[in-house]
Amino acid sequence: MVSTPDQAHPAETPATEPPLLTLPSTSTMLGTIELPGDLGAASSARSFVHGLLTGWADDRLQDALLLVTELASNACLHSDSGRDPNGTITLQVTNTDGFIHIQVTDQGSARSVPYLVPDPEQRGSGFGLRLVDQIASEWGHDYEYEGKRVVWFNLAPPPQDGQSAGGQSLTWTELMCQRAGDQLDLYLDAGLISLPPRMRPTPPAKQRKPHRSKQAAQREQITESLANRITSGGLTQGTPIPTVHILMDEHEISLRSASRIQRSLRDRGLVRLVPGHGYVAGRPGPPPQPLRPPVREQVVHVAAVLIRKIRRGDIAPHARVATFPELAREHGLSKHAAWDALCLVRSRGYAYDTKHKGTRATAFDQWPPEDTSLERRDPPPNHVPEPRRRKPRLTLIPKDPGVGSREWADNGEQGHRIEVSS
């Protein structure tokens, strides 16, 4: 039996291409505005948002006005936009799948980041971000190029447009996870979306491993004994617990075992560390919040500040940009971070290094092109070199034989007369 060509080489089925990792999301820019970094920016931001949302999102208008006032005020009070005489903030309003997305971009700060104050009533400040956290469906902050900082929040649409299983309005992240459907794992692996805390699966409880030695069993017994004394009231709140030396003498254990006992009680939330007094009984307070941005963001921010001064003319050409102590006092940087900031300014072409004279600012004609500069502004007058005045060039013109032995000839280029002698 002879096979036909079709039988010998059956047609290959085309391979199915993997699905495109794109979420069905729509985003419409409603408006953006740049405002000066003074306290009047909050009022201007309210008027701008009021004009954009009136008639479209009246149900969320008052919340948006309240929160945008807090973000604009914080940007002027806690960033370089308010400290710089020419500082500005940028307000942007977007409609993303029915969510009102508002973000405020400032010039950043090397000394602070937005965070929730644990006890604003006792401190007397920090109520603004508390309101943002309670009213907005989502909020956060991020860093952009050149050290700028963005603080944003989302206001979810009414519940009838989308509800979760518990009857609460969905956040934008939850809406994207709901639209992903069966391809949720692909989006998670690609990093396009991340599950919010209330949608993350609860990790299984860790099983206690059996004791491996008598020392571990003794350490566990001492820890349980101290824990029972604290929970039963034998050790009241604020009472110091036995120190490592007392534990070593009473139970004849090593320094490492005594330290592990104290850390175990601390991890269980039964004791807290008081500087200068050691561990005392009592539940520890809230975890410390980060009060400074990452070191890399501080370096980029300080470099952007120095380049901004060079472009405005605050630092004259060939003058010293800054010293390590100056940067440390002004921005709170370490010696290595200050060195990295100056290196970044030199790598951008706005400064050069000199031997025993520090980092000096370059002249305007040596700056990088516009598409690579940090600040797209016109150069200051003292950075623009004056045009050179060229001296007139004199040209000898041959004598006409028909004229006498002495004559005056005109130079056509410069308009000068040259005496030509025979």
Image (spheres, rainbow, N blue to C red):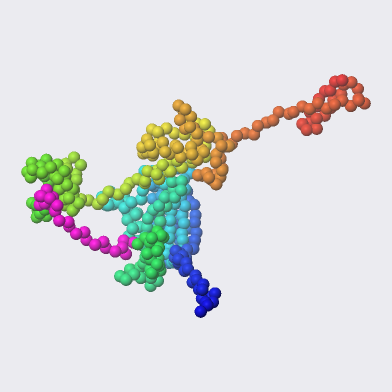
Residue at 40% x, 59% y: name it.
191
User: Of 35 and 159, which appears nearest the observer?
Assistant: 159
Q: Is residue 53 visible?
A: no
Question: If the image is split into quadrants, where does the C terminus sit?
Answer: top right
In the figure, is residue 168 to the left or right of 4? Answer: left
Q: How far across and down, in percent of the image, does residue 241 sit? A: 12, 46
Residue in the picture at 49% in, 72% down = 13
Q: Is residue 4 above or below residue 344?
A: below
Q: Is residue 239 left or right of residue 329?
A: left
- Relative to 97, is 276 on the left or the right? left
Spot occupied by residue 54 in the image (x, y as percentages of width and height)? 46, 65
Q: Quadrant of residue 403?
A: top right
Q: Is residue 215 above or below residue 10?
A: above
Instruction: Establish if 253 lies above or below 9.
Output: above
Instruction: In the displayed orientation, state which residue is furthest to the right.
Output: 402
Which one is in front, 293 or 40?
293
Residue 207, given in percent of the width and then of the height, sits at 19, 59
In the rendered structure, which segment of residues is drawn in magenta? Answer: 196-221
Residue under the point 43% across and 46% down = 147
Q: Is residue 360 visible?
A: yes
Q: Residue furthest front?
A: 1
262 to the left or right of 121: left
All told, the count of numbered labels is 0
Q: Residue furthest left?
A: 250
Asked if the stretch drawn in magenta spans residue 219, the answer is: yes
Q: Is residue 153 magenta?
A: no
Q: Position of residue 163 (x, y in %)?
A: 35, 70
